[in-house]
Amino acid sequence: MHSSNQSRFPLWLLCLLLFVVLVIFFLIRIPILLSSGDSADISVPDVPEAQSIQSQDEQLLDPVDDVAVSADEALIVEAPVAKTVVDIVPEATPDPTPGVHIHSYVNGVCSECGAKPEFVTGFLPKEFYQENEHAGSVTLHEYEVPAYAPYYDGTVNKSFNIYLPYDYDETKPYNVLILIHGGGGNQDSWLNEVYDYGDIQMCGRVIFDNMFDKGICDPCIIVTPVTETNQIQGLTTGIYQMQEELRDYILPYIAEHYSTYATDGTIESLHAARNHFALGGLSNGALFTFEGGMRYDFDLFGSYAAFSGNGEPWKTISIINSNEEFADLPVNCFFTGAGTLNDWQQHYTEIGFDYFVENDSRFTEGVNSWHVDVEGEHEWKVWFTYIYNALPLMFQQTE
């Protein structure tokens, strides 16, 4: 009896073993059930495994052949694709080249954007001195006209250059600027001559090419006559010669042979188009602008620019106000100035400008009249900067 009781397996140990086995069973079985449950809930289509967002972007850029898919497959593909389209393609694409805005001045303010003119007072940016692939053309015209100057008889041989802007179009009208050289100059001074300033070489044609190409102002026809010749000598005789020559030959010739706002070369047609004709010059050419152009040809030019030169402004105003044909004619632009460094005309240009704006109501500072000082001497650096400043204002409208 005693030996049989010792050999019996303890009940408590048996229960413990059963409990351990059950714990191990559930620890193994539960993850398997969970894993199999996930697979049962999601139906994965028969497509390549887990496409990345990058691969879906590539499908947008390179469309694939149409493939028949189930509704579930469509939902899986379309959701990220729609998001990618929004990220890549903006709702509106701005114009990358909106075009150049050319100021259209009326009474000294741009009618389109409200901007007032801003003036350069030193060297122009270097790109304005560099050749532009959109270059205009310069043509020399030689002619024979009567000797209008006192004490000269017969005829004289004269010439002028005509600058036509790049892509000159005979089907549309152009403004016309007459530019007069200084003492000792000729028809090439404003357009063809190259002036060496060390690392910068200046040429008027190149500057005009760049101004028009960069949208500084509308392209125009530029004419550069010779005032004096071997036959006509002296500043005063040159002024007498040119004031008649402009009316009788130069302006009629330009109107008849080129596309301008004048319908023909008659004085009546030129007078009707005066808002689209301008006269300017430097040094002796500035003197001619006052004493020849304004006094005698005021009915043919609506704009004037005079650099480093001056006349007798009291006499000029007296003449244009005493002429009944000139009395009611407006001034669209009056632009003067001189260099600030040893330009002997600086003081006189200031006096002259002040006299105009103080004694004639058709000259109003900041509206149609400007006097600007440019850093430099009596030199081309100054005058090229002046024409850059003045030309955008020369054909503005006044109200």
Image (tube, helix red, strand yellow):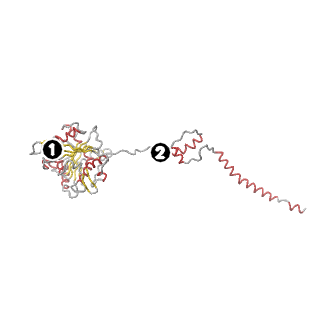
Image spot of residue 149 (x, y percent): 12, 45
Name the disc covering residue 81, or none.
none
Secondary structure, mark 2, is loop
- Of the 4 image quadrants, the one containing the N terminus is bottom right
Gap in Å between the C-alphas at discs 1 and 2?
A: 68 Å
Secondary structure, mark 1, is strand
- Of the 4 image quadrants, the one containing the C terminus is top left
Name the disc covering residue 89, or none.
2
Answer yes or no: is residue 165 visible.
yes
Single out the mark in the foreground, 1 or 2.
Answer: 1
> Relative to the observer, which residue lies in front, 326 or 67?
67
Q: Amino acid at mark 1?
A: Asn
Q: Amino acid at mark 2?
A: Val
Q: Quadrant of residue 99?
A: top left
Q: Residue at x 55, y 48 (%)?
A: 52
Image spot of residue 344 (x, y percent): 18, 56
Q: So how many labels did they put on this image?
A: 2
Q: Residue furthest left?
A: 151
User: Is 21 situated above or below 174?
Assistant: below
Q: Residues within 10 Å of mark 1 (few under 14, many from 20)?
A: some
